[in-house]
Image (cartoon, rainbow, N blue to C red):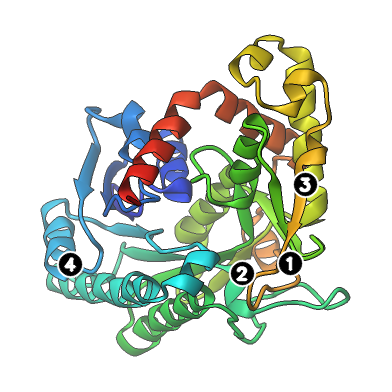
Amino acid sequence: MSDMLVTGGAGFIGSNFVHYYRKEKPSVNLVVLDALTYAGNRANLAALEGQPGFTFVEGNICDEALVTRLLEKHDIDTLVHFAAESHVDRSITGPDAFIETNIIGTHALLKAARKVWTARGGFDGRRFHHVSTDEVYGALKPQDPAFSETTPYAPNSPYAASKASSDHLVRAYHHTFGLPVTTSNCSNNYGPFQFPEKLLPLCLLNILHGKPLPIYGDGQQIRDWLHVDDHNRGISLVFEKGTLGETYNIGGNNEWANLDTVKLLCSIVDQCFAEDSELARRFPASPSARGEQSENLVTFVTDRPGHDTRYAINAGKITHDLGYQPQVSFSEGLRQTVQWYLQNQQWWETLLARHKASDK
């Protein structure tokens, strides 16, 4: 492997993967393709701009001609596909974009890879890795066993349905055409560069600004939290050592109720303010600046339609077959994430300002 195309590489997980893989395999040439929609942010890759072996291309994965040109020009042998619309709430209010990007876009990538690699001597030494989600499996009851790779698909939101469709397309291209694919389905990610509409960064920034922390329903929805670096370690293992045509679930073995997750976040933020008096000056609206508990900002709101009650990943296959183990504990990983947002205020302020302007 020497030349890799990363789709969605300016988004949250994709950009973290690019940084991670650049450190792990500095000799690999990385080409990032990203449409720079609201969740894509070129600033996430600023540290790599201008470096040899790194190329950024603004473009849409639905543009099959563009993808074909990139595969040919850069002689791509590995394609890691992150690009996706991924926010459940947005899929409820506007599902069309999810169908377009997640299904049609994935199909465009599959067609281009098949065409170019076939023309260049076949599939040996090539790999198409598809990054998916645990939401394709639907929801679990409290005592149900965690999702495994053999759990039947039962998506409950337009987002999950679009990802399930893309998973099936990837599988079909392997079984029908022999395309060398692998797929990974992950649990909830957290870490740096996450767009502030997702639960943890949303609540963190609301704490800093003294705004309510919206909790859907009773807050007892269960999620399996996975640090983004642990996810990217798993992805690398899968496309480097995984069996072609196989799916691997990547989880954190770390189930938390949403309400408890937000309470842990609150306690970490309160502790950070107690340890650094400068934070009170920077964020005077935060209850933590006054020595009050930020947990008092928790506000219960009407549950969203079709809200899945529990996700949990059984990562036994990737652990047994590929030796995967998550390395970042939730408390330490969440503290590191909070510190990153505190140290990168300009990053999220610029992103929020751009997002606000685009909504006008």
Of labels 2 and 1, earlier in sequence is 2
| Residue 18 in the image, given as x and y percentages of width and height | 40, 42
Mark 2 to mark 1 CA distance (whole Å): 8 Å
Q: Which mark is residue 312?
A: 1
Element under disc 3: strand
Describe residue 290's horizontal placement relative to residue 37 as left or right.
right
Q: List the residue tagged with mark 4.
A: 63
Residue furthest front in the image: 360
Q: Residue at x 79, y 16 (%)?
A: 274
Element under disc 4: loop
Of labels 2 and 3, earlier in sequence is 2
Of labels 4 and 3, earlier in sequence is 4
Element under disc 2: helix
Say few, some or many: other residues with alpha carbon within 10 Å of mark 3 (under 14 / 14 to 19 / 20 or more): some
Mark 1 to mark 3 CA distance (whole Å): 24 Å
Query: Which residue type does callout 4 highlight?
Result: Asp
| Residue 67 in the image, given as x and y percentages of width and height | 18, 62
Element under disc 1: loop
Q: Residue at x 59, y 16 (%)?
A: 282
Mark 4 to mark 1 CA distance (whole Å): 35 Å
Query: Which residue type does callout 2 highlight?
Result: Asp
Q: List the residue tagged with mark 2.
A: 134
Mark 2 to mark 4 CA distance (whole Å): 27 Å
Q: Which mark is residue 298?
A: 3
Given contact means CB atoms under 8 Å apart, are the residues at marks 2 and 1 in contact? yes
Describe residue 113's horizontal placement relative to residue 26 as left or right.
left
**Looking at the image, residue 137 lies above or below residue 282:** below
Of labels 1 and 3, earlier in sequence is 3
Query: Which residue type does callout 3 highlight?
Result: Val
